[in-house]
C-alpha cells in the first residue's frame, strides 16, 4: 500500500522488474512475486507480463527493461489525458467519486479525476463530492487532498451518506475508477463501489467508470471470475491508526467489490467513451491486444 491505485501499481511493478533484472539468478522468482503482490488490479499482471515479454525477446537486460518500463509509464500518462478528453460527455457539473482515481493513482492526471481536471481547465464549473472510502480512507486522505490542492471545489461525504446524497438530486453523474474490467463490463473497484452503483440506479443518476486499456481484462469473461483481495481485519477494527472496535471482534475486509455491467452507463477510456452492449464495444476497442502469458526466462 506504499504504492496504490491500479495504474500506479502497474507502473511500479514494471520498474520493479527492472530492479529484479540486476539479479539474474532470482529474476524469475522476483518477477512472479511482484506479479502476485496485488491480485485484483490487473494492471500489475499486465505490466509485469509485458516486461517479461520484452525479456523473452531481448534477454533480461536492465537497460532494455528500463526502456520498456518508461514506455509503460509514458503511455499511462498519455492515456490519462485521453480519458480526460473522452470523459467530457459523461461529466456533470456535480460529480460523485469514490476512492482515489486521480494523479496519486496513475502516471498522469488520473482516470476518474482526469475529466474533472480537463473540464476545469476549460473553465467549466465542475464540483466534486468525494467519499471517505473506509477502511483506508483513500477518498479523505488522497482525493480530497488532491482536488483541493488543484483548486477543485470538493465536498467530503461519509460512505454511508451516498444514498441520501444521490436521492437529494445534488449529483448529476457518478464517475469512478476501476481495478479490473471483465469482458462483459463487470467492474472490480474499491469496496463500496457496487453500493454506490445500486443507489445511483435507484435515483436515475448515470454511473460511469474511467480506466485505461491496461485495466480491461478480456480474458476474464465476467466479474464472478475476478479474484478479490482480502486485507487485514485490523483495517476495519481501526480508523486512522486508532482502535475503534474490540480487538477480538471478527471483521471481514474485502478491498474491492464487483459492480455488474447492467449498472454501468459507459466506460470512459483512452479509446473513447464506450457504451453498452459492452461485450461488443469493449471487444472492438481492446479485443486485439490480448496476448498469451510470457514464459518466465
Ligand atoms: O487499494 P487501492 O488503494 O490500491 O485501490 C485501488 C484504487 O485506488 C481504486 O479502487 C480506484 O478506484 C481504481 S485505481 C485508479
Image (cartoon, rainbow, N blue to C red):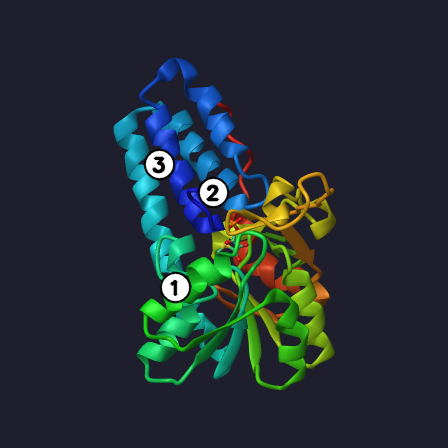
Question: Label 2 crowding class (10 Å Cα cut-off): few <14, some 14-19, many 20+?
Answer: few
Q: Which residue is mark 2?
A: 1
Nearest-to-viewer mark from 2 and 3:
2
**156, above or below 185, in the image:** below
Q: Is residue 13 left or right of residue 276?
A: left
Q: Residue at x 35, y 78 (%)?
A: 120
Looking at the image, which residue sits at the far top? 25
Front-most of residues 66 and 236 = 236
Q: Residue at x 65, y 68 (%)?
A: 160
**58, above or below 251, in the image:** above
Q: Horizontal and vertical percent for residue 49?
A: 48, 35
Q: Horizontal and vertical percent for residue 66?
A: 29, 35
Q: Earlier in the sequence, mark 2 or mark 3?
A: 2
Q: Is residue 216 left or right of residue 185?
A: left
SS under mark 2: loop
**53, above or below 245, in the image:** above
Q: Earlier in the sequence, mark 2 or mark 1?
A: 2
Mark number, residue 15: 3
Front-most of residues 28 and 50 = 28
Q: Based on the displayed image, in which of its 4 quarters is residue 162 positioned?
A: bottom right
Tag 2–tag 3 contact (CB < 8 Å):
no
Tell me the distance, in whole angstroms, between the alpha carbons under discs 3 and 1: 26 Å
Tell me the distance, in whole angstroms, between the alpha carbons under discs 2 and 1: 18 Å
SS under mark 3: helix
Amino acid at each position: 500500500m506504499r504504492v496504490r491505485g491500479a495504474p500506479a501499481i502497474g507502473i511500479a511493478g514494471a520498474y520493479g522488474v527492472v530492479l529484479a533484472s540486476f539479479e539474474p539468478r532470482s529474476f524469475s522468482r522476483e518477477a512472479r512475486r511482484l506479479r502476485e503482490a496485488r491480485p485484483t488490479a490487473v494492471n500489475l499482471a499486465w505490466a509485469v507480463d509485458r516486461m517479461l515479454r520484452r525479456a523473452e525477446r531481448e534477454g533480461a537486460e536492465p537497460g532494455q527493461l528500463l526502456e520498456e518500463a518508461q514506455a509503460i509509464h509514458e503511455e499511462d500518462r498519455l492515456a490519462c489525458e485521453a480519458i480526460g478528453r473522452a470523459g467530457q460527455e459523461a461529466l456533470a457539473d456535480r460529480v460523485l467519486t469514490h476512492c482515489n482515481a486521480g494523479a496519486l493513482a496513475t502516471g498522469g492526471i488520473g482516470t476518474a479525476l482526469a475529466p474533472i481536471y480537463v473540464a476545469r481547465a476549460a473553465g467549466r464549473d465542475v464540483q466534486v463530492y468525494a467519499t471517505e472510502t473506509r477502511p483506508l480512507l483513500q477518498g479523505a486522505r488522497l482525493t480530497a487532498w488532491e482536488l483541493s490542492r488543484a483548486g477543485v471545489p470538493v465536498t467530503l461525504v461519509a460512505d454511508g451518506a451516498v444514498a441520501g446524497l444521490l436521492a437529494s438530486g445534488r449529483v448529476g453523474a457518478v464517475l469512478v475508477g476501476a481495478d479490473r474490467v471483465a469482458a462483459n463490463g463487470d467492474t472490480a473497484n474499491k469496496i463500496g463501489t457496487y453500493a454506490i452503483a445500486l443507489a445511483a440506479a435507484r435515483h436515475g443518476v448515470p454511473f460511469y467508470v474511467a480506466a485505461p486499456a491496461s485495466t480491461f481484462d478480456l480474458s476474464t469473461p465476467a466479474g464472478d471470475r475476478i479474484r478479490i483481495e482480502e486485507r487485514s481485519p485490523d483495517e476495519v477494527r481501526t480508523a486512522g491508526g486508532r482502535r475503534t472496535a474490540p480487538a477480538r471482534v471478527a471483521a471481514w475486509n474485502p478491498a474491492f467489490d464487483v459492480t455488474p455491467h447492467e449498472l454501468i452507463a459507459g466506460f470512459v477510456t483512452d479509446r473513447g467513451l464506450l457504451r453498452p452492449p459492452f461485450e461488443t464495444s469493449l471487444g472492438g476497442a481492446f479485443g486485439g491486444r490480448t496476448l498469451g502469458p510470457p514464459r518466465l526466462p
